[in-house]
Amino acid sequence: MADLAARVDYLAGFCCPLGGLPAGKARVLGHGVEIFLSTGRELVYVYDREGRLLTAVYKFPGQVWHLEALALRRALYVLCARTGIYCLSLDQASKSVNQNGGTDEEREPPYPVIPVDPDTCVLPDATLCAFTVLDSVLVTLAQGPTQWKVQLFECPCPGEDPRPRGLIGEVELSTYTPQAGSPGQPGAPRFPPVLCCVSPPGSGALHGPFRGPGGFTLEGALFGLLFGADPSLLESPVIVCGLPDGQLCSVVLKTLVTSQSAPGDPKALVKILHHLEEPVIFIGALRTEPLAEDVEDPYSDCLVALGHHGRTLAIKASCNEAGNLVPELREYCLPGPVLCAACCRDGRVYHSTPSNLCVVDLAQGGAHKDPMQPDGGPRGLPSLLCPASLSVCSVVTLCVSSSMAEGGVELLALSAKGRLMTCSLDLGSETPRPTRVTAANAGRKIKELLCGIGTVSERVSSLKKAVDQRNRALTCLNEAMHVGCALLSPQEGPRPISCSITTSWLRLGLRDLLTANCLLDNSSGFRLDRGWTLCIQVLSSPHASELDSASPAVTYTMPMDRLGPGGRQEVTLTLGPGEDGVLNLPVTVSCALFYNLREVVGGALAPSDSFKDTSLDECPPDVLPGQEGICLPLSEHMVDMLHGLRFSGLSVPHTQAPGPLGPASHPVNTFLATCRRLDSEQAEPTSLRAKHLPPAVAAIRVSAELLRAALGDSYSGVSLCCATLQWLLAENATADVVRAQALSSVQGVAPDGTDVQLTVHELAVTDLCPEGPVQAVEIQVESPSLANMCMAHHAVIRRMQRMVLEQAARGSNPPDVRMQYLHQIQANHEMLLREVQTLRDRLCTEDEARSCATAERLLQVHRELRSPSLLLL
């Protein structure tokens, strides 16, 4: 078939939701000069073609699913979702116009909004999914809990009593798997079912009680072969149903009327014609055989059904080798997904895909006559269908108009952007005729070709850009999946991507700052590029006065800059102290890799300017879940007081680490700030406590055997006390000073400038084991500041706990101990704790003179509690 070019005329534009109109929900219907259409919402528009004017808008109580107009009765039947079928009189539409109807948002001049009267509901039923109206009956397809049901009602006229006249007949079609819906109500089908009426030839079918707009007439031979009855004897139309699961079923209308009183199984009335194995989108009929000259009203000789994914069924009566008529059934595969379709008696089927409006010709089989076929018999169907483009895209609903001149076809279409248009095809122009080429005709033809080339080029460029974006996104997602598997899979040895954290002191102006250096090492074979971010969270310990509040946390994010295999990236963060000179330790530093899915995939999934198939997914495709990425933890490091101690007075001057320098301050401002800091230091309670109170002391005792087993050969050549002190300060930036002098006692400086003394010495613990004294090592922490002493003591205990857990995992056995000795220590501690509670309660009630003695006793009791009574074995 030669390529056709449609002449498109845009009539009007209508409001549509974001992303375009959904396929399968919008409807357009031509009725003389009037066009009725719905955009899948609760509004039905009435458009006048002659005046090119929108005359009225009807507002229904719910979403509109289907429209049908009955010409003889001048009635419009509308199926409203979960409500029922409404019947409107077209002659009285102008009389019922309410100029003030609707809210301010709904009134969009110049057309009025007409709220539909609930009394116009002729068939209230929440389960209806499709219907077709004949002259005197209304055929509906209802969705039961687990099956479909065809029902027949007497059709009331507009203006008559709208109450249902009663059920004439019904039959169950087939079962289905119910979708998730509200309780007690099945979910709405994703693809609405298709319902149409097929009539046999003859005067009874054409002029009898059964006639309507949603049907067609088949030739007697095909009618008898399809439904297994002689049309002259049957004299009844047949209802053909296309279900969302792909079934094509048929029910004889005449038997359906008497099914309630007929004996036998009602399911025997249903005949399964075919199964497309995909949702049925369209059922129609057309003429494929040439007509005789004396025939004025031809009947259709081919039944066509289209599925959503492009599977097409064509059934026609043809002659076999013996000359007998047999049904010829052929399946074709058209480009999909198919959004809508229409056909007329010229043998052509028009169907819309997300990118184009195409036409296929089923009458081409007549051009190549089979030599084995008997003369005079009907020709067969073509073996292959080749779609021809009409150069129209974004069509979501389609119907054939009857107002085209002879030799042509006019289609009424509604685009995804809500534009109503007509597509006119002059089929007679396919036959080449000698025409005189003029300059005007040649110029117009060249202009049309150039416009077509530009449109195709723009579409190709847009599609290529979208494909490239998706390919890049898939490549990035593939690498991200490999990185995630490498980090999350359990494996021994170093991780392929690691982040090590060290601490150091940095001098900025007159302030010394404790910094954390995070080194990201990519030892894997993958590149950390677009979408990857290094996230470092610093969780500070709460102040003593804010223990009940949540700990303050700060998160730093650093996007990756093409960190390839073997690459490293270092980040330096300032931990403190702050402007007040206080640094609450410990501080937890956590490192993780975050992969931003929205940044990588969002652009590829964003809707482009070209049409997208919204029927495939009800949700907008650019909406990602609430979690916009994945987080892969790398490491966690706790910075405590042992990391923050400085030993600048022991050896060579402290080497300043390279780092960014702050802006130079004015000398006068620097001098004033120094004076204010010195005044505050002289007046602070810590300085007063150091002058008048003894230093705070805490200690912990560890078995010498346990320490030797934990240290191993790493500290050979030095005494156990020196090795223990070096092990405690191994992660300190200035630990080389202590290691070089082999010290067992060292005095450091805390971040706030207070001294902290660490002393390690050996002793023998008696009365613990029955075998005799146990050699042990005592680690003593001393500082004038009670807070610094507690932070240093906590840091030592944390390292001891980690050492004990590691040794327990190796299966070490501690020696036997005397339980009486342990019970006595526990009793002494319980007595001291009770005394602490009594002293604290007394401080709340005593005056200032007596509270000094109570506070002194309270400090003495705390000192006794911190005495090393227990031993780590």
Image: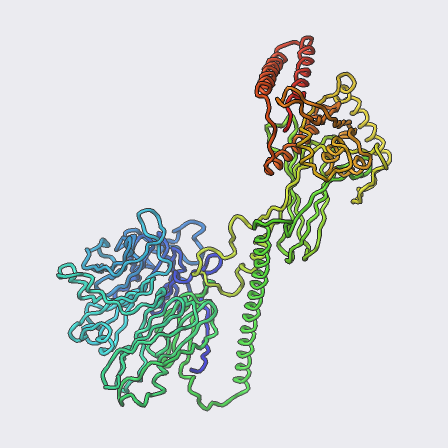
Q: Is residue 659 above or below residue 867?
A: below
Residue that appears at 63% across and 35% down: 802
User: What x and y, as percent, mark residue 113?
Assistant: 39, 55
Along the line of sight, which residue is nearer the eye, 780 or 647? 780
* In this picture, residue 201 sits left or right of residue 263: right
Along the line of sight, which residue is nearer the eye, 144 or 418? 144
Residue that appears at 46% across and 57% down: 17
Count of labels shown?
0
User: What x and y, as percent, mark residue 384?
Assistant: 39, 79
Residue that appears at 80% across and 28% down: 677
Can the viewer see residue 751 in this picture?
A: no
Can the viewer see residue 386 in this picture?
A: yes
Q: In this view, does 677 lie above or below 125?
A: above
Position of the N terminus by quadrant: bottom left
Position of the C terminus by quadrant: top right
Q: Is residue 687 above or below residue 458?
A: above
Along the line of sight, which residue is nearer the eye, 724 or 13? 724
The answer to which image quadrant residue 855 occupies is: top right
